[in-house]
Image: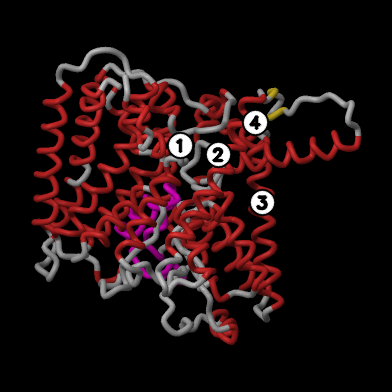
Amino acid sequence: MNLPQVGRLMAGFVGFFTLAQVPPLVLSLTEPSSTHHTTTGFLASIVVGGIVAALLFAGGRVAQGQVFRKEAIAVAGLAWVVASLLGALPFRWSGLLPSAVDALFEAASGLTTTGATVLGSGGNCAVDAVPRSLLLWRAETQWLGGLGIVLVFVSLLPAMGVTGKNLLATESVGVGSESYQPRAVAKARTIVAIYVALTIACLLALRATGAFGWFDALCHSFTTLSTGGFSTRSSIRDFGSLAAELVLVAFMFLGGCSFSMLALHWRSGWRCIPALARTGEFRIYTLVTLLVVGACCLSLCRAGLPFGTALREATFNSVSVLTSTGFATANFQAWPALGTIALFAAMFVGGCSGSTAGGFKQVRLLVILKLLAYTIRHFISPKSVERLKLDEEVLPAATISSILAVVLLWFVAAIVGAAVVACDDRLNFVAAVSCSVSLLGSTGPALSLVDPAATQAALAGEVVAMLAGTPDVGPLGGYGDLQGWTKLVLTLQMILGRLELLTLLALFTPSFWRR
């Protein structure tokens, strides 16, 4: 392990992340005085970030040699941990979140684009009462984390002499196709350019609806393309705009598409869309989206909602959960069983590989379905010989094994995480499992048991009372009421899921740090 090289790269990363706090600092200077010391919080955070960057640079200034796989994994894993710690400082030192654990949870949730929040719960102030500078910082952490802050770092700081291949490879685990693994800094720049262009398009579209001012439109464009889910209100339904919901649905769906595939075909202009649509992963992504929306719509119609209202709520919340965005216009944990089961299943799968979405990714689901179909055919005709293909490319056995291993590891991590957080006595079985799955899949809102009689109240938009002693971790609730150690475990789940498990787990392997 070339530790000086890791320190050198981390110094540039910390410097970049510290500079990202300048816009909210400038905004804080224009805010009226309040109980939250936002300017002090950002200034102190920038000073600490500068000191950390200087120390890392001093330790890495003698670095020599190339960045190989171990160094790339170390930078990717450590970057998310360090960014979460530094990103928590403005929340903590401004006085917004007095608890250091809450501040760390909020920062990690932003950078991993999970969207789970402690605001509005556990004695913390509601989202509506948060100063604009901190709302901007919340949105900015999600935008930076959308394609991976390591990806942004590589594309903006190529002068450090590092080829992007190894760093970018840590974002795609278990997919062997060339189409899904960007290999160069030029590809990273293209992806970031597409990301920025779509963010601007989302900003202008939201502003054109008339429901969003420029500030709200900016924050929501940041958190929509990143499939993050932080809002400037307690719920998207507070804006009361069908046009805005349609815009958000469209850009959430785009955020769940493969930016890597778009980057491969971007020179062809609008023809890159048909090229994307021809891929197997996009087709199954679209099919799964339609199935989840259909199941939720059917469930709501059977519960008595008019078809138009049912379709509106089912479409928005289904796309939000499947793309792991986490926006909500309804308290879907109180929906009938068919709808909640469909949404719970969507938390597992997530969006496409090379996208900003979480979950174990649609391409892995597609390969597993192909493998199951092959197993059935081979059982019927044992002597038949065929090869599994993905978009006309033969999948090597090693790639298939890697995909199966990652998906299995994903389920193991979800079960182990659920078992650990279940030690928090206030979490019932449903809440413990859904919290683990939701945060591992970067979704944000979880599910909990509610009074079955509350279904009609939820469908009518009324406040739903939770069972006695049960914290509300649903789409209109928060994680602030959980115990401190529970939030730390869930923070680890968020980072594990964002780095697709293997990257972070490698850091805890003793042999990893040996030369």
The picture places residue 31, in percent across and down from the top left corner, at: 14, 63
Left/right of residue 230 with respect to residue 344 in the rendered view: left
Q: Could you tell me which residue is drawn at 25 percent across and 53 percent down?
A: 137
Point out which mark residue 502 bears: 1
Of circles 3 and 4, the one toward us is 4
- What distance separates the C-alpha of mark 3 from that of mark 2? 20 Å
- What segment is highlighted magenta in the picture? 211-240
Point out which mark residue 75 bears: none
The residue that mark 2 highlights is 406
- What distance separates the C-alpha of mark 4 from that of mark 2? 10 Å
The picture places residue 356, in percent across and down from the top left corner, at: 46, 43
Q: Could you tell me which residue is drawn at 45 percent across and 27 percent down?
A: 169
Colour scheme employed for the rendering of this structure: secondary structure
Q: In the rendered structure, does residue 396 fall within the stretch colored magenta?
A: no
The residue that mark 3 highlights is 288
Left/right of residue 290 with respect to residue 451 in the rendered view: right
Pick the residue in front: 175 or 201.
175
Q: Earlier in the sequence, mark 3 or mark 4?
A: 3
SS at badge 3: helix
SS at badge 2: helix
Q: Are marks 3 and 2 in contact (CB under 8 Å)?
A: no
Q: Are marks 2 and 1 in contact (CB under 8 Å)?
A: yes
Q: Could you tell me which residue is drawn at 76 percent across and 41 percent down?
A: 372
**Residue at the bottom extreme?**
453
Q: In the rendered structure, does residue 227 fall within the stretch colored magenta?
A: yes
**Residue at the top extreme?**
65
